[in-house]
Amino acid sequence: MTTTPTARPAAPATSGRDWRAPAAACTTVILWASAFVSIRSAGEAYSPGALALGRLVAGTLTLGAFLLVRREGLPARAAWPGIVTSGLLWFGLYMVVLNWGEQQVDAGTAAMVVNIGPLLIALLSAGLLGEGLPRRLLAGMAVSFGGAAVVGLSMSGHGSSSVLGVVLCLVAAVAYAGGVVGQKPALRHGSAVQITTFGCLIGTVACLPFTGVLVSEAADAPLSATLNMIYLGVFPTALAFTTWAYALARTTAGRMGATTYAVPALVVLMSWLLLDEVPALLTVAGGLLCLAGVAVSRTRGRGRRGGPADPPADARG
């Protein structure tokens, strides 16, 4: 995608490092990790398409109300190709196939396959957005992916997997990567709230064929499952996708993708604290590797010969 002369100006430089973008990225990672706990409850009562639609409806209503309060209108025309791309791939396709895939494979296999997403983001953003592939980013992602694989293997013990489930998780990873790379240029032409709101709306429209199933299942679902679905829409979707977009506008897509490797480590911790699922030592080791890789990928190189330079400190997430 190309930019136009009417692109929004970059955030003004500040004398020190801006804490807001890192805080936004941390908020996203924590809320996305919490989503896995809620999906376990909601997924027992709702089918993949119905769960995705219910979550998106809750997210769209929340974002729409926030957009009205802020009195923000439609984003610029140049933002719409990215909004449509992220809406169809990330908000729509990704959420449905991920819910479906996690019903076909054990949690460990799903974690390993879906976690190729950040690697795909780095490759696509290098080729399509010209971000380059800094060595520290690649090294950090390699360490984190190794940690995610260790977590996945330690959780795969007695589960079952199918070829269909692996394919669905792979499609989810590709849709996630494509959605992020499509969203990045759109953020030059609209605010994080605008881009997230209309992307979520497009994903909701794409999932409308599941309306009948959602209504039918909601009538029989326990209140806890429905509340978890609403939670998924309000917090891991409306809030977390907005803080993601805010941080993404201030760093590269590759670095933001690498940040999400902290999610498996937090899922292990939350499952321990909230579900009394005591992790094995191998799982803990894998989680620590994930965090170590994120730390490496977020550090600044002292200098490189050739290749694009890192963004300035005030523009990082």
Image (spheres, rainbow, N blue to C red):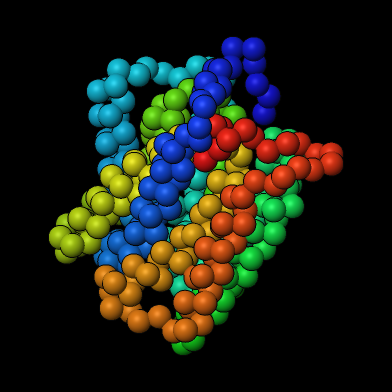
Image side of residue 162 versus residue 241, left or right:
right
Q: Pick the residue in front: 166 or 266.
A: 266
Q: x and y percent of residue 68 in the render?
A: 27, 22
Image side of residue 207 versus residue 181, left or right:
left
What residue sits 34% from the left and 59% below the top? 34
Image side of residue 225 versus residue 113, left or right:
left
Return the residue found at the far bottom.
158
Q: Is residue 193 above or below residue 158?
A: above
What residue sits 36% from the left and 53% below the top? 31
**Quadrant assignment, res 164:** bottom right
Q: Looking at the image, how many numbered discs can be counted on the residues?
A: 0
What residue sits 58% from the left and 53% below the top? 258
What residue sits 43% from the left and 30% below the top? 192
Q: x and y percent of residue 172 in the render?
A: 54, 56
Q: Is residue 289 above or below residue 310?
A: below
Return the residue found at the far front.
15
Q: Pick the residue in front: 286 or 292.
A: 292
Residue 219 visible, this orientation:
yes
Q: x and y percent of residue 171 in the render?
A: 58, 57
Residue 173 visible, this orientation:
no
Instruction: Assign the N terminus to one quadrant of the image.
Output: top right
Return the residue found at the far right.
305
